[in-house]
Image (cartoon, rainbow, N blue to C red):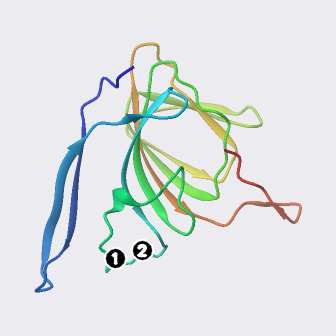
């Protein structure tokens, strides 16, 4: 199933040989199917370190980001297809999810649930969770920024990532 939403436009700045700022990229691309087929992803940029190095000329879309990038950061767009559900998962990152359109249900592993709509922001702090698009007709688009974080420690032991 294709997303019914338009392509993503990405504008990237940098510096010329004279040290002056310039636009290095201005491109558009569609989201692509993920492995389970309930969502479509578009990697916008990733860095290999936090803090990031603005002298690193690596194209951010060429980084091997996976879900997160160890010691780095990732920004991606996720289109949650109608009725789509993610697996329960936890990453060692702090994630900022900006809902651009539609609605998404966030469920934690203790059963807490909330529906979050457009113009809302989710701060996901290493908790075990899943996403579900409650609509049977509308795609939900979320911009996620993931930054590596130390795992949550419970009873003296760090909780493992669940992917």
Q: Which one is in front, 159 or 2? A: 2
Q: Specify the label residue 160 is tagged with.
A: none
Residue 93, image x, y percentages: 59, 58
Q: Mark 2 points at which residue?
A: 52
Q: In this view, does 130 lie to the left or right of 133?
A: right
The kind of secondary structure element at disc 2 is loop
CA neighbours of label 1 inside 10 A, class few (<14), some (14 to 19), many (20+): few
Residue 81, image x, y percentages: 44, 24
Q: Picture quarter containing residue 154? A: bottom right
Residue 85, image x, y percentages: 57, 26
Q: Picture quarter containing residue 107? A: top right
Q: Which one is in front, 54 or 97? A: 54
Q: Which residue is drawn at 13% across and 71% down?
A: 22
Q: Is residue 85 positioned above or below 52 on the image?
A: above
Q: Is residue 26 left or right of residue 83?
A: left
Location of the N terminus (image quadrant): top left
Q: Is residue 108 positioned above or below 12 on the image?
A: above
Q: Which residue is drawn at 29% across and 36% down?
A: 30
Q: Mark 1 points at which residue?
A: 56
Asked whether the beta carbons under mark 1 and mark 2 sit within 8 Å of each other, the answer is yes
Q: Picture quarter containing residue 157? A: bottom right
Q: Residue at x 47, y 17 (%)?
A: 135
Separation of marks 1 and 2 at Cα, in angstroms = 8 Å
How many numbered marks, from 0 up?
2
Location of the C terminus (image quadrant): top right
The kind of secondary structure element at disc 1 is loop
């Amino acid at each position: 199933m294709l997303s019914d939403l338009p392509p993503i436009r990405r504008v990237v700045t940098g510096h010329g040989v004279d040290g002056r700022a310039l636009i290095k990229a201005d491109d558009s691309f569609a989201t692509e199917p993920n492995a389970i087929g309930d969502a479509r992803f578009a990697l916008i940029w990733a860095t290999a370190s936090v803090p990031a190095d603005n002298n690193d000329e690596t194209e951010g879309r060429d980084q091997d980001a996976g879900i997160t990038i160890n010691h780095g950061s990732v920004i991606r767009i996720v289109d949650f297809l109608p009725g789509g559900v993610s697996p329960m998962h936890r990453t060692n990152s702090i994630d900022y999810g900006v809902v651009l359109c539609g609605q998404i249900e966030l469920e934690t592993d203790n059963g807490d649930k909330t529906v979050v709509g457009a113009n809302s922001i989710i701060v996901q702090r290493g908790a075990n969770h899943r996403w579900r698009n409650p609509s049977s007709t509308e795609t939900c688009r979320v911009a996620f920024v993931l930054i590596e974080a130390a795992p949550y420690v419970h009873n003296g032991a760090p909780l493992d990532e669940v992917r």
